Amino acid sequence: MIGNVVLVVKPSMTDAELNTLFAAAWPDHRQVQFGPVLQRSLTWIAARSGDRLVGFVNVAIDQARASGMTWLHVDYEPHLDGFYRGCGFRETAAGLLHLA
């Protein structure tokens, strides 16, 4: 628990609460079904404040390492660079093509 936020590994979550969370973070978010994503996921962690979903991460670094993974790639926006560097990520060159 962090403050009044509880972290739960691999909890059940509804599409509605995940879509609400994603829409709060990304105004252009389109409603999706998360079941297929979670079925292919190594693990995920949800952060809850009471009954409300307030955070979600799909793959935790320690869980990936424990499963035998040797590399983990993450995409993030520039203002989050300090956070990810603090987690041990390093900058890499990559390409991105907007298809829509």
Image: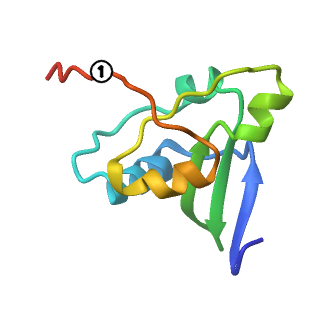
Seen at 54% across and 26% down, the residue is 37
- Indicate the quadrant where residue 60 lies: top right
Tally the marks. 1
- Residue 66: image x %, image y %? 85, 30
- Residue 81: image x %, image y %? 44, 51
Compared with residue 53, is residue 23 higher up or lower down, i.e. above or below?
above
Seen at 65% across and 53% down, the residue is 46
> Residue lying farthest bottom?
3
Compared with residue 50, is residue 68 higher up or lower down, i.e. above or below?
above
Compared with residue 48, is residue 42 higher up or lower down, i.e. above or below?
above
Compared with residue 42, is residue 44 higher up or lower down, i.e. above or below?
below
| Secondary element type, mark 1 | loop
Mark 1: few/some/many CA within 10 Å (<14, 14-19, 20+): few
Q: Does residue 21 appear left or right of residue 12 in this picture?
A: left
Q: Does residue 37 appear left or right of residue 24 in this picture?
A: right
> Residue lying farthest right?
66
> For the residue marked with disc 1, what is the amino acid?
Gly
- Residue 80: image x %, image y %? 42, 54
- Front residue of 25/80: it is 80
Where's the N terminus, which quadrant? bottom right
How did the renderer colour the structure? rainbow
Seen at 48% across and 57% down, the residue is 82
- Residue 69: image x %, image y %? 75, 20
Q: Does residue 47 appear left or right of residue 28 in this picture?
A: right
Seen at 55% across and 58% down, the residue is 55
- Front residue of 100/75: it is 75
- Front residue of 57/30: it is 57
Where's the C terminus, which quadrant? top left
> Residue lying farthest left?
100
Badge 1 is on which residue? Answer: 95
